[in-house]
Image: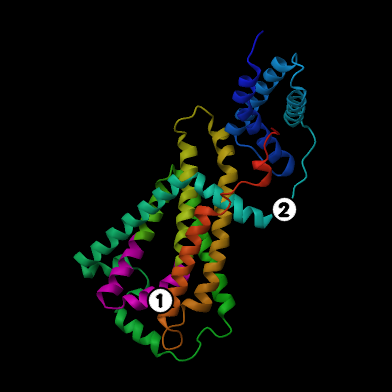
Amino acid sequence: MIINLARFITEERPHWTELEAMLSRLENDAGCRLSVDEVKRFHLLHERASADLAKIATFAAEPEVRRYLESLVARAYGEIHETRRRPHRLAPLRWFFRTFPRTFRRHAGAFGMAMAVTLGGAAFGGLALVADPEAKAALLPFEHLSGDPADRVAQEEAVQKDELSGKKTMFSAFLMTHNTRVSIAALALGMSWGIGTLILLFYNGVILGAVAVDYVMAGQAKFLAGWLLPHGAVEIPAVLLAGQAGFVLARAMIGWGTRDSLAARLRQVAPDLVTLIGGVAVLLVWAGFVEAFLSQYHEPVLPYEVKITFGVVELMLLALFLAKSGSRPDAAETEGAPR
């Protein structure tokens, strides 16, 4: 067999580098688990490297490349036939700052759908209230939202003492558990092929839109922003993330574009679902603390400008975190073949 050795090495090196990067991930992270597509790619790269080694084995001019390929193929073979149990290493910070945002970005389409459904519900709720103010009782089935927004604002601003004194921890715990239950429901309703998740998100959007329009029409937009933004800047995206997980589960249930069995599809998405709902729980813990310790205080106790600024900064940081955190590859992932 006659081959152009220089051209052969140039063409094949990217595949060796890709295999090297995958091996480094597996060797440096004992908890690393490849997806089905990644396993298939790994097996293909291993076979290709083995074939390349057979082609180059007869050339004495490139002993360094041959030794490198021998090592690469041996490492890949060892990973494929590994039988020892990998030790489990708990790395919560790595999970939250790398795995969670990466999982979010991998299913960005499902998040976009959750946001679209919620915004659609908000538009419906707001327009319904504008068209028929008498529908407020049906749209907002909560006692503290059923009255005149101006009266509530006046009542809240007249309070000069801390009504939550000694109760903040209990109140924040109640908020965390309640919102977490709603989020878990949004995920679990994905078992209804996404219909339940869609209804829940739309209904939450209806309430949000009706509340916003009610307070804006009453001239209390500033109070609304100061009340909702500190905790809502995290709480609302967290519910959307739970809806995202529900739609990911729904897609696995439906099985678009795949011939895998239902059990195989569920096994494939299970780690991502756990990651998403775990991230939601962490965000809701933060939102619960903020709502109990900050959102419930209004002027003159706490200026609205301070609360609004806090909420805007939170929202910007959360968006930046989800969009960028973990986007840079690990050192193990960037490690390539020697040249």
Horizontal relation, residue 97 to residue 312: left or right: right
Q: Is residue 182 visible?
A: no
Q: Secondary structure at mark 2?
A: loop
Front position in the image: 284 or 54: 54
Magenta stretch?
206-232
Residue at position x 45%, y 52% in the image: 243
- The residue that disc 1 covers is 226
Q: Earlier in the sequence, mark 2 or mark 1?
A: 2
- The residue that disc 2 covers is 90
Is residue 222 shown above or below 234?
A: below
Q: Residues within 10 Å of mark 1 (few under 14, many from 20)?
A: many
Residue kind at label 1, given as amino acid type: Gly
- Residue 95 in the image: x percent, y percent? 63, 53
Q: Quadrant of the C terminus?
A: top right
Front position in the image: 167 or 13: 13
Residue kind at label 2, given as amino acid type: Leu
In the picture, residue 127 is in which quadrant?
bottom left
- Residue 123 in the image: x percent, y percent? 28, 59
Q: Quadrant of the N terminus?
A: top right
Q: Is residue 225 visible?
A: yes
